Amino acid sequence: MGVDDSDIDKMEAVNSNSQLYRQFGNSIVVDVMCAMFRNLNIKGVRKDG
């Protein structure tokens, strides 16, 4: 989901597994979202990735 393993370790230290599942289940990969916006010609999306 675009999150580093070190960030996941930090999240695991303060959240339960069920909370982590909810957080990741309600997320979207930022790179995928940007690609969708580019394909839809929505302005304001950087073209550097």
Image (cartoon, helix red, strand yellow):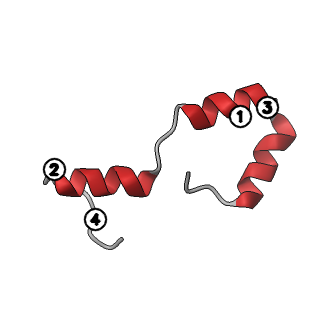
Question: In this view of the protein, can residue 2 be seen by the observer?
Answer: yes
Say left or right for 8 vs 28.
Answer: right
Q: Is residue 7 above or below residue 11?
A: below
Distance CA(mark 2)–CA(mark 4)? 13 Å
Where does label 4 land, which residue?
46
Q: Residue furthest left?
A: 41
Identified by mark 2, the residue type is: Leu
Say left or right for 21 vs 44.
Answer: right
Q: Residues within 10 Å of mark 3 (few under 14, many from 20)?
A: few
Q: Residue 24, position in %: x, y?
A: 60, 37
Instruction: Tell me whether circle 1 and circle 3 mark residues in contact (CB < 8 Å).
Output: yes
Where does label 1 land, which residue?
20
Q: Residue at x 27, y 51 (%)?
A: 36
Q: Earlier along the polypeptide chain: callout 1 or callout 2? A: 1
Q: Residues within 10 Å of mark 4 (few under 14, many from 20)?
A: few
Where does label 3 land, which residue?
17
Identified by mark 3, the residue type is: Asn
Q: Earlier along the polypeptide chain: callout 4 or callout 3? A: 3
Q: Residue 29, position in %: x, y?
A: 47, 50
Q: In terms of secondary structure, where does tag 1 sit?
A: helix
Q: In terms of secondary structure, where does tag 2 sit?
A: loop
Q: Earlier along the polypeptide chain: callout 2 or callout 4? A: 2
Q: Residue 44, position in %: x, y?
A: 22, 55
Where does label 2 land, which residue?
40
Q: Residue at x 76, y 43 (%)?
A: 11
| Discs 1/4, front | 1
Q: Residues within 10 Å of mark 1 (few under 14, many from 20)?
A: some
Q: Nearer the viewer, residue 16 or 46?
A: 16
